Image (cartoon, grey):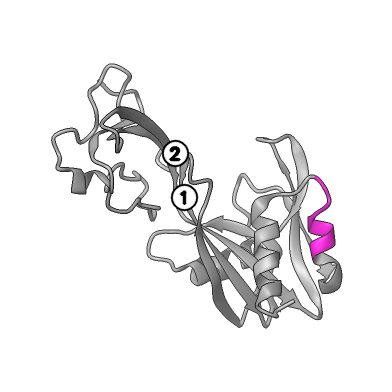
Amino acid sequence: MTDEDGAPGADEGPAGADAPAADLRELPAFSDGRNHSLPGEPEWPVEEVVVEYDEGWFVGGYDRVEQPDGTEKKYYWAELSPATVIVAVADDRVLFVEQYRPTVRNTQLELPAGIVESGESYTEAGARELAEETGFAPSSTSLLQEVWCSTGVLRHTRGYVFAEGLEPVDVDHDSNEFLAPRAVPVDEALDIAREPPTNDATLEGLLLAEREGLL
């Protein structure tokens, strides 16, 4: 059976159970067509994949895996589309956004970020998200690093993008975005980002940019 959103119900068998192990990495499919953070080919045998939750943009479930000692274990995962995080610099200032995060119930000063849409690269998504969230579009972007995030539970990649040559454009926030741009002096950006509450994406992005000599 399925729920009203078309996701497998609790009584339904594993999704793709009859597929060969090499094909299981392609499950689940995002219903809105966005990109995937797909896992690699399994080194340990995957006996089945079960999708327990599918909201189109967020999918959760588990792989039943045979471990090296022959025992089996369910490894739970949540898959999200890849995200882009932007370190944007202009006039010796770094662009942040201040926004309330209901999931952790606090307001954070963060680097602009967002989901990579279908067909976009990290840099293309970064330029779009920067314009949407701050009102500034970059003339150039470059990818600093791609990483896997919280690998104990997530199937989610993140691309850190450096942007410069900023020009003002009209702001077009998503319906669930309530944020305010903030410009922070480059030499204060890391110290400000380390003040609680903070988050991994902001710190990682600034540290990568600093390591590359961009801050």
> Taking 88 as reference, is 98 above or below it?
above
Residue 199 rendering spot, x and y as whole percentages: 70, 49
Report the front residue among 77 and 5: 77
Residue 200 rendering spot, x and y as whole percentages: 66, 52
Quarter placement of the C terminus: bottom right
Q: Which residue is painted at 60% across and 46% down in the image?
A: 175
Secondary structure found at label 1: loop
- Which mark identifies residue 78? 2
Report the front residue among 35 and 22: 22
- Choose the circle earlier in sequence order: 2 or 1: 2
106 to the left or right of 188 = left
Q: How many marks?
A: 2
Residue 212 rendering spot, x and y as whole percentages: 65, 78
Q: Amino acid at mark 1?
A: His
> Taking 164 as reference, is 197 above or below it?
above
Which residue matches tag 1?
Answer: 156
> Taking 168 as reference, is 82 above or below it?
above
Q: Amino acid at mark 2?
A: Ala
Query: Where are the magenta residues, as a range?
Result: 190-196
Proximity of marks 2 and 1: CB atoms separated by less than 8 Å: yes
- Which mark identifies residue 171? none
Quarter placement of the N terminus: top left
Q: Which residue is painted at 79% across and 57% down in the image?
A: 193
Residue 170 visible? The answer is no
